[in-house]
Image (cartoon, helix red, strand yellow):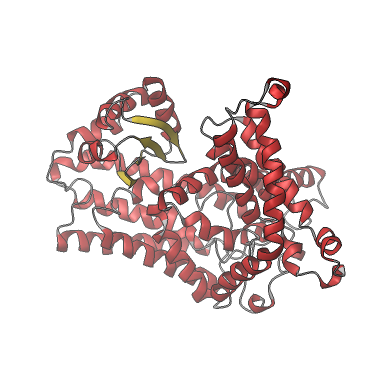
Amino acid sequence: MFSYLQKIGKALMVPVAVLPAAAILMGIGYWIDPTGWGANSQLAAFLIKAGAAIIDNMPILFAIGVAFGLSKDKNGAAALAGLVAFQVVTTLLSTGAVAQLTGVPADQVSPAFGKINNQFVGILCGVIAGELYNKFHTLELPKFLSFFSGKRFVPIITSVVAIVVSFILLYVWPAIYSGLVGFGISIAKMGPIGAGIYGFFNRLLIPVGLHHALNSVFWFNVAGINDIGRFWGPQAAAYEGLPEAVKATYHVGMYQAGFFPIMMFGLLGACLAFIKTAKPANREKIKSIMLAAGFASFFTGVTEPIEFAFMFVAPGLYLIHAILTGIAVFIAATFKWMAGFGFSAGFVDFFLSLRNPNASSPYMLIVLGLVFFVLYYLIFSVAIAKFNIKTPGREDEDVEDVVEVNGASDNAQLAAILLPLLGGKENIVIVDNCTTRLRLEVKDSSIVKDAEIKKYVPGVLKPSQTAVQVIVGPQVEFVADELKKLV
């Protein structure tokens, strides 16, 4: 079950990867017309509407993207099936349809059905379609029905299953919706303290890849909070439709802003601490690795190359990192220093959000970031030295190979080195990847040489006997392509 949840988390990265496009389009539009939101500029209106076309349709993108991501061969038929499932479920469970099916007046239908077009249902439909594709895409029907065999059969069976799922959701969706809303509100109504708790758990779930599930409650419209949508939406509508329990404590952007000081500055302080505490013979080599990882974190908000460098060798440090993240989110929310992002809290999103009317004292996040840079550097340096933690550059084994491969001239070299350490092509069943990780299905994860692999990449995870994740970094897609060629 745990491994399957991670698989879904990986598939979620397909639609989530679309968000940077929306952020760029809307960010430029807001920069051009920060007060009129397109009323004063046709170009700004064009860009803002183009970005909103992505943000406002995230549930459909989730249904399509998750189905595609879960399919074994990443086939478009799975994506089509995801769309079919989503359209059937959301149509049958719309307020008007429910009123007709149950004989209840529309104004007395549970408000849950007014929110049926959401990311949670999108993910559910994507999972159903993806699994049905994997089961039936090779099905052979009798000759007189052969035209509908194989991949053509998948959208058909998906529509039938979606009808059954709609019938079940007709009775259970109100309870599910209430549970999701209750979970979000229980934290959201705590105001800045709740934001800090959310920030803490956001980082704590990174190692298992389940932080996306938590994010969907606060960043999207599953529980009515929709922090990303509200930040990038019209200023006049930023607080419309909020759950009553959070109206007094919510401020638009409060579940995003506090991550900027951590990703742009705090983790850079950690990188500097790793460089300072590395063994003298390794310092220059570790410096080159940490500078590259630090730049990725600062510029794009992709933090895994840094975090996986120490989360397993120094779990205590990673706990401190999660706590500091929670504190940063709490402080930003308390003082209402707000900025938002479409992908992650890096410089690109920060720059694009500066002239967004929903931004509030965003430059104070830089000041806060500088404070956290110092905190990370001092805390990590002292802890590493005091407890002799084997952070990068302090390992007992020689790190010569680490630097040599991380600085490899091409991704093919890294793929060729990883293949035998993963048990050879005979042990590899499926090669896939997300934003920063190789996600592999293997016959036996016990023969994978963790220690050797960690000489070349930040980390290795073994969620199950047949699953292995290799933390590579932002260039992972190219390494995956090279590994597929070898396999």
Q: Residue at x 54, y 71 (%)?
A: 333
Q: Is residue 26 visible?
A: no
* Nearest the eye: 466 or 405: 466
Relative horizontal placement of residue 28, taking residue 137 as reference (left or right): right
Residue 179 rendering spot, x and y as whole percentages: 59, 70
Q: Identify whether 147 is placed above or below 157.
A: above
Q: Identify whether 299 is placed above or below 186.
A: above
Residue 109 rendering spot, x and y as whole percentages: 80, 69
Residue 421 rendering spot, x and y as whole percentages: 25, 31
Q: Identify whether 43 is placed above or below 380.
A: above
Residue 184 rendering spot, x and y as whole percentages: 57, 69
Relative horizontal placement of residue 446, taking residue 243 as reference (left or right): left
Q: Residue at x 44, y 26 (%)?
A: 481
* Nearest the eye: 94 or 51: 94
Quarter of the image with the C terminus is: top left
Q: Is residue 432 visible?
A: yes
Q: Residue at x 30, y 54 (%)?
A: 311
Q: Residue at x 75, y 69 (%)?
A: 111
* Nearest the eye: 332 or 465: 465
Relative horizontal placement of residue 478, taking residue 276 as reference (left or right): right
